[in-house]
Image (cartoon, rainbow, N blue to C red):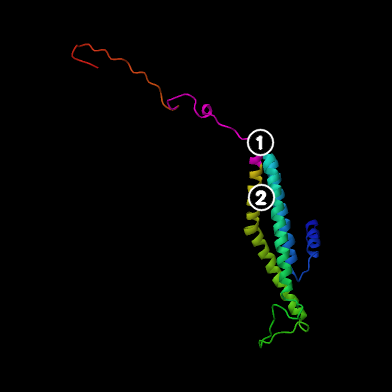
Amino acid sequence: MGCLDKIKNEFVSWFDKDNNAGFLFVTAALGWVLASAAQTVGLMHNKELSKEDKKFLVPQELADGAANIGMYALVTTKLMNGAEKLTKPNKNGKTFINLKDETGKILDYSTHTAEYAKMGRNLQTGAAILGGIISSCILTPIVRNAFAGYMKKRADKKAPEEKLTLQDNYSGRIQPFFTKTYSYPAFKSYSSNMKI
């Protein structure tokens, strides 16, 4: 058995084989971490960017990665916990989702716990997928744009205001810079009939 097989088997052993939700959650979060790290390292080693650009872009990418991972973890864990509760009895002893047999009769939770648990695991898997979609496609861009707007306002307050004077806007030149100045020759009349 190779080294990669050992790592794979060790990684898979961390998760319940009957529940894909935990595996999806961890691998998606790990994907976010690796993507953010790759983007940050790429920015740090980009030779086309100046030091000033890197001072701005690297922290921005780290904040962006933290927002992505944080939003994903927050939304997905809440949805997974909610999905699991849908198939467990509440204070009244009733479940929100009821399983039925072939005849349409509702199955009692106490005698069909395994079936309800399996349905809960399936709902958790769906919640893990839905949490990724909601957090990455809807909530993260909203949070990221709000944070960027806040940082821009903060930077604008720190920057000194430049006061423009008339001399800054007007150089004293009356002709546009793209035109050529022509001097026209004076015509002399050689006959007395011609006047200019």
| Mark 1 lies on residue | 50
What residue is drawn where x is 74% and y is 79%?
Answer: 115
Q: Secondary structure at mark 1?
A: loop
Rendering quarter of residue 15: bottom right
Q: Position of residue 95 (x, y in %)?
A: 72, 79
Q: Secondary structure at mark 2?
A: helix
What residue is drawn where x is 64% and y is 35%?
Answer: 160
What residue is drawn where x is 66% and y is 86%?
Answer: 104
Range covered by the magenta-colored residues: 155-176
Q: Nearer the viewer, mark 2 or mark 1?
A: 2
Q: For marks 2 and 1, give the CA distance.
A: 24 Å
Q: Position of residue 124 (x, y in %)?
A: 71, 69
Q: Name the kind of residue labelled 2 in the image.
A: Phe
Q: Position of residue 4 (x, y in %)?
A: 78, 57
Rendering quarter of residue 94: bottom right
| Mark 2 lies on residue | 147
Q: Is residue 71 above or below residue 189?
A: below
Bin the neighbour count of mark 1 within 10 Å (Cα to Cα): few under 14, some 14-19, many 20 and up. few
Mark earlier in primary sequence (2, 1): 1
The overriding secondary structure of the stretch rendered in magenta is loop
